[in-house]
Amino acid sequence: MGKKAKSSAPDAVLQSKPNEDSYEGERLDEFLQSIQREIKTARFLNAESLPEKIWLKKQFAIGVNEVTRVLERMTPSGDSARIMNPNYKACTVKLQAVLLTANCNPRWLTNHVPSLAMSRKVPLILVKDKEGSLRLGELVNLKTAIAIGIKANGSPVNQLIDEILQRKT
């Protein structure tokens, strides 16, 4: 009849792993501003006259469900899916990186994303800020976004993320 002690297991998501990087404070501000700048540049240079919402969907997987769906459809590292199922069709959409808020509440919404990203060798960038979901939402013109997957399609945003990931190593 005593109170249960809170488990520290959900905090395991916040610990650094080989394919994770975290941003907070000034570093986060600079990172998000540079991504926002590249989005505007890419949108301006894009010859297609797509509505902004559709253009953003072509560039990003927005939300935990969509990021999870794309990661699950990607071939796991080692091509184990092809060995187990010869009829397996690889996903045509690949994620270059996943931006994930570290302060999601409830945490079980995003607990699976780091391990799924690691199994697909997709770098994970944690946004450690009280208003992380608001700040990620601003990138894609939404109120909030808990997770954003950056689709690998050769855009200026991809070049920026490549530079950032190269600096990390």
Image (spheres, rainbow, N blue to C red):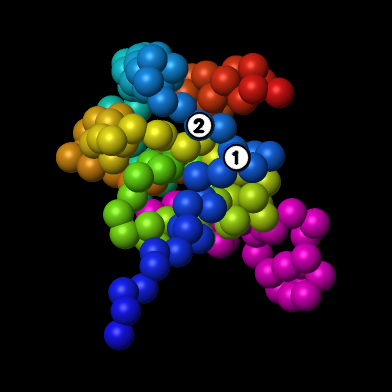
**Residue at the spot 35% in from the left edge and 45% down from the top edge:** 103
Judging depth in this view, the residue of 80 and 115 nearest the camera is 115
For badge 2, the amino acid type reads Ser
Q: From the viewer's side, name the closer residue of 135 and 160.
A: 135
In the displayed structure, 91 sits above or below 58; it is: below
The residue located at (41%, 43%) in the rendering is 102
Mark 2 touches mark 1? (CB < 8 Å): yes
Quadrant of the rendered structure where residue 109 is?
bottom left
Q: Quadrant of the N terminus?
A: bottom left
Magenta-tinted stretch: 64-90
Residue that mark 2 sits on: 22
Residue 56 image-quadrant placement = top left
- Classify residue 55 by image quadrant: top left
Q: Is residue 141 magenta?
A: no
Q: Which residue in the protein does label 1 denote?
A: 16
Q: Residue at x 56, y 44 (%)?
A: 15
Q: In the picture shown, does residue 3 fall above or below 144?
A: below
Residue type, label 1: Ser
Looking at this view, name the residue that lies furthest to the bottom: 1
Dot 1, crowdedness within 10 Å: few (<14), some or many (≥20)?
few
